Amino acid sequence: MTRALPLIIFLSLCVLGINAQSGAQLDVGFVYGKLISDNSQKIIEGATVQFLQNRLDSASRKKAEFVLAIVLTDKKGEFSIRNLPVNGNFKIIISAIGYESLEQKISFDVKLAGGKPADLRNIADDVVKDLGNIRLKEDPHQLQNVTVNANRPLLEMYLDKKVYNVEKDLSVTGGTAVDVMKNIPSLIVDIDGNVRLRNASPQIFVDGRPTTLSLDQIPADQIASVEIISNPSAKYDASGGGAGILNIVLKKNKKTGYNGNIRASIDSRGKPGVGADINVTQKKINFFAAGQFNARKNISTVRSERVDFSGADSILIKQDNRPVFNGYLAFGRAGADLLLTNRTTLSLSGNFFKGDFTVKDRINIFRDSLTATNKRSTSMRDLGADISFLNKGVSLGVKHNFAKQGREYTADFNFNESSNDNISNYQSNGFDAQGNPLPAMGAERATGGGNTKTYTFQTDYTLPFDNGSKFETGARIAARNYSSWNNNFLQDLSTGKYVLLPTTVVNFKFNDVVYAAYGNYSRQINKFSFQAGLRLERSSYDGNIVNKNQRFSNKYPASLFPSIFLSQKISEKESAQLNYSRKINRPSFYQILPFVDFSDSLNLAVGNPNLVPEFTNLAELVYSNNYKQGQSILASFYFQQSNNLITRYQYKAPNTNPAQTDSVIYNSFANANKSYTTGLELTGKNTVGKWWDITSNLNLYNAIVKAANIPGADNNSRFSWSAKLI
């Protein structure tokens, strides 16, 4: 990886340098402005701005007026048009409901010599034109009968994804991405903040790239939108099985001039939050920065119940607890975009996230035999913990737009480092069936921490053709260095000191790397469009349990992952899509590491070093119908078939903790032969009033797991459903 990365970067820059000279057309003009009402000074949102030019029609050999671009003004009344030709005279036509249309002639003041610019660097300022505030006169006749509504909806539904516009949701202000996910129809969020998409854990992306940030480490105030991609194409990572992708798009402003905002909030538990954003765009530089601080207090109520079957006896175990988290989250992000040439942009950005929390909890545990008498007991387990984490990263990227519209090349390098430390103290007190205290067990202490460094290089190239088709290709290398340690102590009742339990010590490291390349071809023919892609991935990992000098390694050979998307527009309101893709789910290092996690004495976990990757075939049939203004439905029928499914299972074995002599239940992982999942998801959006929208989601699915190959397990099936109403 170390020797390959400089070579890849060098070749990418060489390709960029060669292609940067190939564009002969000067479609580099940039026009921007703002629309306001002539009488009320009110900004005009949703107005249409057309950019036209007289050109020679090759068919009639006569000059005709051609539309070069059409845009709408945003909620601030602003508009911008890029990649315009800089030669000749042009005309802008502006129209808005309730206002009189306006025509305005403009031209770029580019000094040409012999029909060509002498030096592109000298004309950079001439190809940018600020039209300032453009005033439109109100048309009273239109205003009598027309109501304008140009607000962006909270949820936008497309055939290949759903887009949730976080900026429209005030309920998540001051929260994290976990709060955002709770309001998205297709997602289920459990009490620990784990997100499920169609009963699977999706990959988390930030701005189109995989991230090491967890959802509770991303402030909601920094999120512009979330894209829910249930069946990603070959352009995306094949890992993750059929769980899909949640792409979090962060806010990034590029409006000309100086702009920003300052905000403050207080949540329902009286915890304050403050944040600020600033954006500065001047000529060739766009600078942005954002910061966020939130004090947090989370209180949860947890109840669990289980029965342990052991020979002739069965034990009922109930747990009740109410953990309280107190602490803060701090987030910072800054970066700049530098226009190297009129078509090439260099971007540099960095971010950090810091969090510190204290946890107080009391777990009440009740045990009772279902077959014998006088075996009832209760206990209390008090927990006090201090948790801290820090995540920081930097991104460097370059993007080149060619003269041909839609043709572009990008290359970026990302580095991210995440670290965490924690210390937990436990005190247990037991009572017999009559409520009498049992002998003291002594206090327990657990300390731990870890560090992860991730390096990613990715390059992409898009080539459009004149027939409306498009070819995309790219390559990616992702490497990760991970280390973690965990110590467990037991208090000596005679001295009061904590004694290390050597057999429970965990200190391990691992490195893994994934190499990938892909190609995608898409084309639209009338109302029918298709996309076909193929991805190639190869990976390997190498791990080491340092304190035991045990090594684990594996190399997964190159595998192919095809994808195909077929789409048909049935009418102006209806469309349908059929798609297929192949995915892989590689076992994580936690799943294969054969050490016992003692953090919860009643739920011990251990890895399985014999796990192999899981391969999944995913198919989906989607139907969309916007049957009425403000009324729409999206129906998805999906099917997944997996080989070597990585699944959880439990087994009973002697306790490896030397302080205990009983047998316990271990939670681990194994490869089941096959699994089949069939589901139907319905998402509807209905406007029932000017101020009231309803978004509903219903997901029905049936899972069949062929697990008879696992000792003590059998084939199983389960029907499940989930529903949301927002």
Image (cartoon, rainbow, N blue to C red):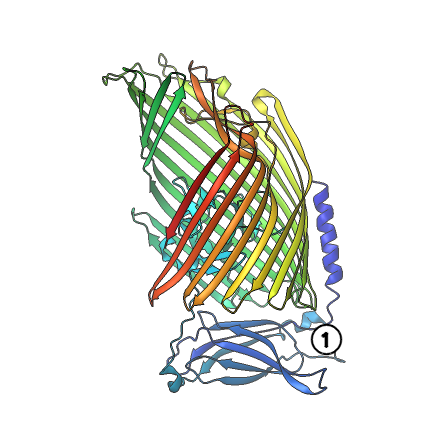
Q: Nearer the viewer, residue 317 or 463?
A: 317
Q: Position of residue 450 (x, y in %)?
A: 52, 33
Q: Which residue is mark 1?
A: 117
Q: Position of residue 328 (x, y in %)?
A: 39, 43
Count residues near mark 1 (Cα–Cα under 10 Å), then give few for <14, some for 14-19, many for 20+. some
Q: Nearer the viewer, residue 688 or 392?
A: 688
Name the residue: 72% across, 58% down.
Answer: 16
Q: SS class of the residue under badge 1?
A: loop
Q: Quadrant of the C terminus?
A: bottom left
Horizontal placement of 520 versus 373: left or right? Answer: right
Q: Position of residue 414 (x, y in %)?
A: 60, 48
Is residue 683 at least partly visible in the picture? yes
Q: Position of residue 265 (x, y in %)?
A: 34, 54
Q: Quadrant of residue 14?
A: bottom right
Q: Amino acid at mark 1?
A: Pro
Return the residue found at the far top. Answer: 494
